[in-house]
Amino acid sequence: MRAEPLAVMKHTLRFLALAVVFLLLAWRGAAAQGPAADASALTVSGGLASFEVSTNVLGTTVRGKSSALTATTLVRGSAAELLLERLEATLPVASLKTGIKLRDQHMVKYIFQTADGQQPDLHFTAGDARCVRVDSVSPYSCSAAGTLTIRGTPRPFSITLEVIPEGSGYQVKGDGKITLTSYGIERPSQFGVRTGDEVRLHIEFSARTGSKTSNPQDLPNPVQ
Amino acid sequence: MTRLALLLGAICVFLHTSRVAALPTMIRLGYIDCASCHYSPQGGGPLNPYGRAIDEAQSLRAGEYKPRENGFVRAISWNGRIAQDVRVVLPMQRAWAAHETTASFRPRLLYRNVTELPHGFGAYFTITGETDAVPRSTVYDPTPRTSSPIVNVALLRYRVTPALELFGGRDQLPSGVNVPDLGTFIRQRNRLGAYDSPAQLKLHWAGRRHRLVPFAYTGGGNEADGERESGGGALAEIDPIGSHHLVVGVNVLRGRADNGARRMLGAHARFGIGPWGILAEHDVTSRTRGGVDGPFRQHATYGQAFWAAREWLVASLIGERLSVQQPFAERIQGGRLELAARFTSIATVSASGGVQRNATTGRTSRSLQIQVALKTVY
């Protein structure tokens, strides 16, 4: 049975109209979903991580820092927001320095050493973090919630990130807090000077973008 | 005679009579004041147990401080209530000025004691014995009468809270950047030298980011005739950005004696991060003297850039400047390189070499100094 040419044209036009509507809806949906599907792998090595903890003695604060922070994440970016996926960061505890060698040894022994004498790296992992900015000149900001593992004990941890585009990469600053008691760590004390329970953490690094990928599995492991 | 006077002046200027007191360079490690390591919040005097641990950790030996707990130590420390030490300072000096060379060796012995008493009271004593006195090299501010031994500190403390302490007795007045070297212009020319220990009442109020020390004082009894000065002032310091690596402060003082009066306004800063840092102070003192028309002004400046090559080894480049208006006109500039090595908590050795030019007389002098400091630790 042959169809009427007019009916065929009508069906074709209806199909095309539906297709256009579908495509429009699909495009809007994708736009609402956020950044482009293409993602770049970000790798960090030699990032700066520092901590600060007050003590019971006025005017005495213990600070330490390391420039051995390594991290990886996958970034999907648009003008308005950045999506950080599969965020991982690692810091060797032996790289943290407070300016006094003996104090560094005490810190590793009393804070980071496990009962069986191991000194595992600090490790942070987080899922997705959506960073937004209010206008094109402001930095992206977001909170990355995940797990920070200290001396093998994982605990929930979130860090506030500020991401500034910089050439083909980003400059990132982050601040967070932990409490020693939440990790079952006793506050260290030396001849009457005892640290507080709350430790403020700060990270700062420039990250370069690597190869573009749409598969999170393609991410490199953090440099050890 | 003129040559001899010139040489004597140069020696006095160069004889850096370090009391081996607090180390403001410790700001590089986040210590914004002296109270963390010293019993006295003004610095100097015996170290508290934490200070002894830091002292040992910052030495070449870098060992653990282990307090001795035997019966003898318990007896002499009144079961831990008394902290005391004996210090020997051996400065050896050689100076060249106006074709004259001189050498000096002026050992000093110090006994320092802090006794904790009940109800927040405490007593501080420092007694110094020396072989030769070092007069102040100025005509408009005569040196106090020297003696050996001399009581530098005899102070009673009442601790209202850990942040608020009241002191009364004999001590040095609070000073700005608080360098231990008593021979610097900022100290020597502002009555903060080796023999200046006026009777005083002072309040020490400290917080995590500030320090305020108002004080009133009168003569300590060893001043030259007509130089017994009474007055008051305040030292105020703040950590402006809360980093614990920068402190800025001001020091004001107003005093009057029979032979004249002085008003001092000083500003200072301590900054240090990682292995290096800077200490700086500038003081302006307006003085009047009997028999002299009108006031004259004195400017004293101190600058030190330091670098801790190792925890136990600190190199410093120090610059100083002094200018005094007529009728006591003086313009002196100097600089020196200093190396201080703490081998153990017991032994510190420092060496310095410097040059100084007196623009008023056109003379240049040079000096070398080696100082060995030994103290008891238990």
Image (tube, coloured by chain):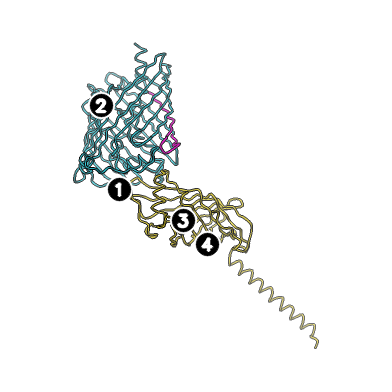
Chain colours: A yellow, B cyan
Q: Give the alpha-carbon distance from disc 4 to disc 2, as whole Å.
A: 69 Å
Amino acid type shown at disc 3? Pro
Determine the image quadrant of residue A209.
bottom right
Stretch in magenta: B306-323
Q: Give the alpha-carbon distance from disc 2 to disc 1, as whole Å.
A: 33 Å
- Left or right, B126 with respect to A133, comes to left
Q: Which mark is residue A192?
A: 1
Question: Which chain letter goes with mark 4?
Answer: A
Q: Give the alpha-carbon distance from disc 4 to disc 1, as whole Å.
A: 42 Å
Question: Which chain letter goes with mark 1?
Answer: A
Residue A159 in picture, x, y percent from top left: 47, 58
- Looking at the rendering, in which quadrant would you find the N terminus of chain B? top left
Q: Which mark is residue B129?
A: 2
The residue mark sitting in front, 4 or 2, is: 2
Question: Which chain letter goes with mark 2?
Answer: B
Q: Residue furthest top?
A: B1
Q: Nearer the viewer, residue A6 or A98?
A: A98
Q: Nearer the viewer, residue A72 or A143?
A: A72
Q: Residue at x 36, y 32 (%)?
A: B348
| Visible residue check, residue A50 | yes
In the picture shown, does residue A19 fall above or below A43? below
Q: Are marks 3 and 2 on the same chain?
A: no
Residue B260 in picture, x, y percent from top left: 27, 24
Crowding at mark 2 (Cα within 10 Å: few <14, some 14-19, many 20+): some
Q: Which mark is residue A120?
A: 3
Q: Give the alpha-carbon distance from disc 1 to disc 3, as whole Å.
A: 29 Å
Under circle 2, the secondary element is strand
Question: Is the C-beta separation of discs 1 and 3 under 8 Å?
Answer: no
Pointer 4 residue: A129
- Looking at the rendering, in which quadrant would you find the C terminus of chain B? top left
Determine the image quadrant of residue B359.
top left
